[in-house]
Image (cartoon, helix red, strand yellow):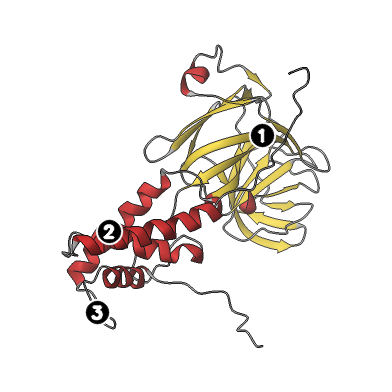
C-alpha cells in the first residue's frame, strides 16, 4: 500500500473560522462567512487561545532558554534583556589574544553563527562586550561591527544568538551553566522562589554563585531575579520556560498548535459563535459535547509521561 509520505496537514486562521461557522449552522458547505463575521470570529479565536494559555502546560511551547549574565546584576527583564532560546545559543571561545579596538576575531569555531547575529565577548575585565557580527569570514574567524572596548585573552568565552527571547508565561526550573571547561557543566538551582520568599532574602546585591531564582511574569515583559547576583560572566542561567502561543496576525496564518489540535480549535470556536448566530439550544448542546470531546483527547495527549514509583510500607500493620 502506497502512502503519501507527507505529514504537513494544516489550516489557516480563516479556514478554522469557516469550519467553526459551518459547525454551528451559520453557513452551508461551500459558503464563506462575511468580513464582519470573520472579524468577530477572529477576535473570539484569539480570546479563546489566550484563555487556554492559563490552563497550564502546552508541551510544544515549553522551551529551554539561556540568560546571559552581567556581573553584579540580580534582575533581568525577559523581553528586553539578553536572553534567547537554548536552540538559538552558540557558545565558543577566542582562538587567540585580542586587543582593544580589534574587530576581526579568531574563534575556536564559527559554526552556527551568521551575519547580524548578536555577539558578546567576555573581556579580561570580566564584563561582556556586546555588538553584532558583520561577517563570518571562515570556520575560525568573524568580523564584528564595533571594536572591542577592552582586551580579551585566548579562551575567553564568546556568546552569540539571533533572536531575543520574549516574555515567558512562567519559568519552572533553572540551572547555572559554567562554560569555562572543555564541556559546559550544569548545577540545578536549589529553589525557584515565590514572590515573598525572594523579597524576604537579605542582601540581594551580594555577589556569588547563583543558586536560586524568582520569576515575575508582569504584563508585557517578565522579570527574572537570581540570587546570588553573579560574580562572573563565564556562567549563564539555563531555564525551562512556558512561552506564549503566537497570535493569528493574518487570515493566512497557521495556528501555533500541533495539527492534532485543529479539530479542537474548530469545535471550541463554534461553541463561542453559536449564540451570536442563533444556533438552537439543542444544537448548541451537541456542539459543546463535540468541543469538549475533541479538546479532552488532545489535552490527554499533551502531557508529559512521568515515572510512578511504589515503595513498601515498612513496619506498618
Q: Position of residue 69 (x, y in %)?
A: 61, 34
**48 to the left or right of 301:** left
Q: Which mark is residue 28?
A: 3
Q: Position of residue 50 (x, y in %)?
A: 36, 49
For label 2, the residue is: 285
Q: Earlier in the sequence, mark 1 or mark 2?
A: 1
Q: Secondary structure at mark 1?
A: strand
The nearer-to-camera label among 3 and 2 is: 2
Examine the rendering and report whether any part of residue 248 can be seen: no
Label 1: how many Cα within 10 Å (few below 14, some 14–19, many 20+): many
Q: Secondary structure at mark 2?
A: helix
Q: Position of residue 44 (x, y in %)?
A: 27, 57
- Residue in the foreground of this view, choosing between 275 and 262: 275
- The correct choice, above or below, for 206 with respect to 178 in the image is above
**218 to the left or right of 59:** left
The quadrant of the picture occupied by the N terminus is: bottom right
Label 3: how many Cα within 10 Å (few below 14, some 14–19, many 20+): some
Label 2: how many Cα within 10 Å (few below 14, some 14–19, many 20+): few
Cα distance between the residues tagged 3 and 1:
54 Å
Q: Residue at x 46, y 54 (%)?
A: 296
The nearer-to-camera label among 1 and 2 is: 2
Cα distance between the residues tagged 1 and 2:
48 Å
Cα distance between the residues tagged 3 and 2:
20 Å
Label pair 3/1, CB-CB below 8 angstroms:
no
Could you say which quadrant of the image residue 230 lies in?
top right
Q: Which mark is residue 175?
A: 1
**In the orientation shown, which residue stands out farthest toward the bottom?**
1
Q: Residue at x 81, y 43 (%)?
A: 183
Q: Position of residue 166 (x, y in %)?
A: 47, 46
Amino acid at each position: 500500500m502506497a502512502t503519501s509520505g507527507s505529514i504537513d496537514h494544516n489550516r489557516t486562521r480563516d479556514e478554522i473560522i469557516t469550519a467553526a461557522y459551518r459547525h454551528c449552522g451559520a453557513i452551508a458547505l461551500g459558503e464563506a462567512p462575511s468580513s464582519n463575521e470573520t472579524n468577530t470570529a477572529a477576535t473570539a479565536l484569539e480570546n479563546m487561545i489566550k484563555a487556554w494559555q492559563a490552563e497550564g502546560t502546552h508541551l510544544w511551547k515549553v522551551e529551554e532558554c539561556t540568560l546571559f549574565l552581567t556581573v553584579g546584576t540580580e534582575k533581568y527583564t525577559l523581553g528586553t534583556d539578553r536572553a534567547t532560546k537554548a536552540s538559538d545559543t552558540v557558545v565558543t571561545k577566542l582562538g587567540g589574544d585580542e586587543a582593544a579596538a580589534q574587530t576581526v576575531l579568531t574563534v575556536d569555531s564559527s559554526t552556527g553563527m551568521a551575519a547580524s547575529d548578536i555577539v558578546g565577548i567576555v573581556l579580561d575585565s570580566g564584563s561582556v562586550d556586546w555588538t553584532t557580527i558583520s561577517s563570518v569570514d571562515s570556520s575560525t574567524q568573524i568580523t564584528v561591527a564595533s571594536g572591542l572596548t577592552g582586551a580579551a585573552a585566548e579562551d575567553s568565552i564568546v556568546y552569540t544568538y539571533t533572536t531575543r527571547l520574549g516574555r515567558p508565561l512562567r519559568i519552572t526550573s533553572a540551572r547555572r551553566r559554567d562554560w569555562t571547561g572543555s564541556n559546559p557543566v550544569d548545577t540545578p538551582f536549589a529553589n525557584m522562589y515565590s514572590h515573598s520568599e525572594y523579597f524576604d532574602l537579605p542582601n540581594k546585591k551580594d555577589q556569588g554563585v547563583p543558586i536560586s531564582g524568582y520569576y515575575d511574569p508582569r504584563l508585557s515583559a517578565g522579570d527574572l531575579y537570581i540570587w546570588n547576583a553573579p560574580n562572573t560572566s563565564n556562567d549563564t542561567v539555563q531555564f525551562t520556560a512556558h512561552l506564549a502561543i503566537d497570535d493569528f496576525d493574518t487570515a493566512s496564518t497557521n495556528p501555533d498548535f500541533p495539527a492534532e489540535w485543529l479539530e479542537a480549535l474548530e469545535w471550541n470556536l463554534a461553541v463561542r459563535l453559536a449564540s451570536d448566530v442563533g444556533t438552537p439550544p439543542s444544537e448548541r448542546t451537541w456542539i459543546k459535547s463535540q468541543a469538549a470531546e475533541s479538546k479532552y483527547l488532545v489535552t490527554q495527549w499533551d502531557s508529559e509521561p512521568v515515572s510512578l514509583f511504589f515503595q513498601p510500607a515498612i513496619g506498618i500493620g
